[in-house]
Amino acid sequence: SVKDMVNQFFAGLMRPFAKHIYALEAKSNPETVKFNAVDSLKDTKVKALVIHSADDPMVKKECHFDVLENALGDKENITFWLMEGKAHSPNYTYDAVKYKDAFFATLTEKLKRKELETEQQKAEFVASYDWWAMTAQDMDVWNRIFKFIEK
């Protein structure tokens, strides 16, 4: 499926760069790079909303959401919201997520077939997509976030 291809694309694409990304993060944010979310939230009294997509290919639910919920689920000031079908973009509309997935599936295929070799090919490919549609915001999600903040 397209979703599986996108997940594999991201997992395969990012894996070789993980140590480099971490090194850059450590250099850019030496005070915070080793923060642990559970340790950071366990003693807080402030309200926190943890939003995660069950199908996130970049930050696995089991490695983030489940860990936080298991450790902090009994805290009244922390609310957990697990979404379905939003991949790594829970604030996007479902249509935007599908459109983005289709973009990356097409990108992957074109790269495999070496159809994006020249700057002109790349520019034409990028121009062929509606970037507003790809990043359309889900106002129901934002309204729920704002409602949470206002409580």
Image: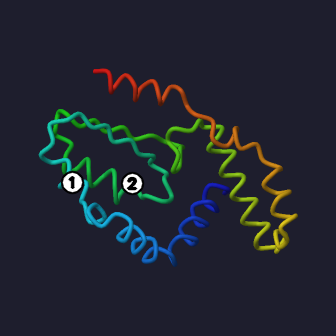
When asked about the image quadrant of residue 82, the answer is top left
Q: Is residue 77 above or below residue 59?
A: above
Its colouring scheme is rainbow
Q: Is residue 27 above or below residue 127?
A: below
Residue named by callout 1: 38
Task: Count the numbered circles shown.
Answer: 2
Percent across and percent down for residue 150 are 32, 21
Percent across and percent down for residue 62 are 35, 57
> What secondary structure is found at the residue carrying circle 2?
helix
Percent across and percent down for residue 72 are 19, 46
Question: Residue at coordinates 37% horizontally, 22% vertically from top-left?
Answer: 147
| Three-letter amino acid code of the residue under disc 1 | Val
Q: Quarter of the image for the N terminus: give it.
A: bottom right
Mark 1 is surrounded, within 10 Å at the Cα level, by few (under 14), some (14 to 19) or many (20 or more) other residues, namely some
Question: Residue at coordinates 81% horizontally, 63% vertically from top-left?
Answer: 122
Mark 2 is surrounded, within 10 Å at the Cα level, by few (under 14), some (14 to 19) or many (20 or more) other residues, namely some
Q: Which mark is residue 61?
A: 2
| Three-letter amino acid code of the residue under disc 2 | Lys
Q: Nearest the camera: 27 or 14?
A: 27
